[in-house]
Each structure stands twice: as structure tokens, then as C-alpha cells.
């Protein structure tokens, strides 16, 4: 008995019937479907970002343009602090009481300087040294004789010049004040000078 060369014909199987979803199953399905997010769009977006971020082959990455640096500000040196100049104490008059004591001999004249016959340069040097020693020795009242200068010459110049010297700041550290002497001590040709106390 010969076999047939034709393959057997398979008849299609009847597809099973799909069961209809109940109301509860349909509501559950809708809830799950709303919570599911599509993944395809996110993957495509990430791939696009990677493509733009990757540098092209053969070209080095271009660094972002840097902002031009601001010009350096010049350094301004701080002004030197001002050194306060020491205040020069003002001259103080001897007062009537002190003058009376000196004229009557109740206050002692502790030293005398006679500038008669000296030039201005020599007289200035002698006056400076005399007052410095009197200040150092702690003297209180001294007498400086300038001469009246009625006959003219150097004595008249010193009579005008010595009070100006005693008013200068350079002598203020030694001199408290001065006044014309009593006639018994030379009158207009001499000066009572009060010496400033030394600070040790």
C-alpha cells in the first residue's frame, strides 16, 4: 500500500471564547492603566540628550568662553597717620604778688645773666645755656640783664630782642613767664624770668 505524498491538512482549532470582564475587573484595570507611565518616550528623550552632549568625532570639546577678567585696581597706600604736635604751653605772667616779693627781696633771685657787650649770636647762645642749666637745677626765679641801650649799640638791640626770644617755642620748655624787673634790679634793662620745673 502506497503512502500519499501530500501532507495532511490540519484544520484550524476553534479559538476559545474570551470571557467578558466584570464591572469590578474593568474598574481595577482602568485604575492600573492610569498609573502606568509609558517608557518609550523617556528612553527616546534620554538618547537625544546623550547625542547632543557627546562631542563629534575628530573635534576636541570646545571650552566655554571665559569672561574677560576685570582690570586690577591700583593699590593706594594708606596715608601716614598724623603725629600730633606737642602743645606749647602759653606764657603766664608772674603776677603782682610774685613781682612784689621779688622787688622787696622776699623771693630770692637764684641766678643772674648779664648780656652787656655781647653780639646777638653770642647772647642767644648764652641765654639758651643759662636757661637750660637753671631748668635742670630746679631754680624758680632768675634775672636776665639786657641793658637799657640809651646810647644805642648792641644793648638796645638786645633789650628788644631778648623778650622775643623768650616768647619762642624753643624756650617754652624752660620758661613759664617773664616781666620787666623792678628799678632796684635794673628796671627796663632787666627781666625777671620764672623757670619751669623740671620733670624727672
Image: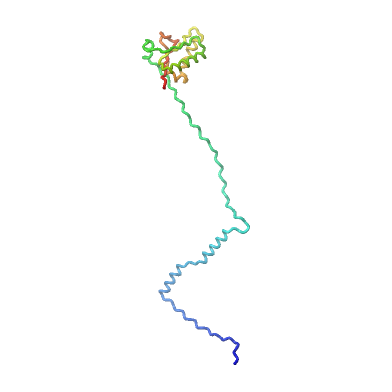
For the point 39% across and 16% down, which residue is it?
94
Q: Position of residue 82 (x, y in %)?
A: 48, 30
**Image quarter (top left, top right, bottom left or bottom right) of the C terminus:** top left
Q: Is residue 200 above or below residue 21?
A: above
For the point 47% across and 29% down, which residue is it?
83
What colour-coding does the image apply? rainbow
Q: Quadrant of residue 90?
A: top left
Q: Position of residue 41 (x, y in %)?
A: 52, 65
Q: Nearer the viewer, residue 18 or 84?
A: 84
For the point 56% across and 60% down, which residue is it?
50
Q: Nearer the viewer, residue 59 or 15?
A: 59
**Image quarter (top left, top right, bottom left or bottom right) of the N terminus:** bottom right
Q: Quadrant of residue 22?
A: bottom left
For the point 51% across and 35% down, which residue is it?
78
Figure disc tally: 0
Residue most toward the right? 58
Q: Is residue 56 above or below residue 20?
A: above
Q: Is residue 170 above or below residue 185?
A: below
Q: Position of residue 135 (x, y in %)?
A: 43, 18
Residue most toward the bottom? 1
Q: Nearer the viewer, residue 191 or 188?
A: 191
Q: Position of residue 12 (x, y in %)?
A: 53, 83
Amino acid at each position: 500500500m502506497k503512502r500519499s505524498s501530500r501532507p495532511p491538512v490540519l484544520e484550524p482549532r476553534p479559538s476559545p471564547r474570551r470571557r467578558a470582564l466584570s464591572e469590578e475587573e474593568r474598574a481595577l484595570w482602568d485604575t492600573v492603566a492610569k498609573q502606568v507611565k509609558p517608557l518609550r518616550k523617556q528612553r527616546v528623550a534620554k538618547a537625544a540628550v546623550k547625542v547632543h552632549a557627546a562631542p563629534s568625532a575628530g573635534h576636541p570639546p570646545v571650552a566655554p568662553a571665559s569672561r574677560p577678567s576685570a582690570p586690577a585696581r591700583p593699590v593706594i597706600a594708606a596715608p601716614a597717620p598724623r603725629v600730633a604736635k606737642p602743645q606749647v604751653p602759653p606764657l603766664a605772667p608772674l603776677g603782682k604778688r610774685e613781682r612784689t616779693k621779688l622787688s622787696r627781696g622776699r623771693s630770692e633771685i637764684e641766678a643772674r645773666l648779664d648780656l652787656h657787650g655781647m653780639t646777638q649770636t653770642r647772647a642767644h647762645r648764652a641765654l639758651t645755656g643759662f636757661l637750660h642749666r637753671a631748668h635742670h637745677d630746679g631754680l624758680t626765679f632768675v634775672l636776665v640783664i639786657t641793658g637799657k641801650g640809651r646810647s644805642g649799640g648792641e644793648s638796645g638791640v638786645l633789650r628788644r630782642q631778648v623778650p622775643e626770644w623768650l616768647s619762642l617755642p624753643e624756650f617754652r620748655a624752660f620758661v613759664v613767664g617773664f616781666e620787666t624787673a623792678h628799678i632796684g634790679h635794673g628796671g627796663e634793662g632787666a627781666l625777671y624770668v620764672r623757670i619751669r620745673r623740671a620733670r624727672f
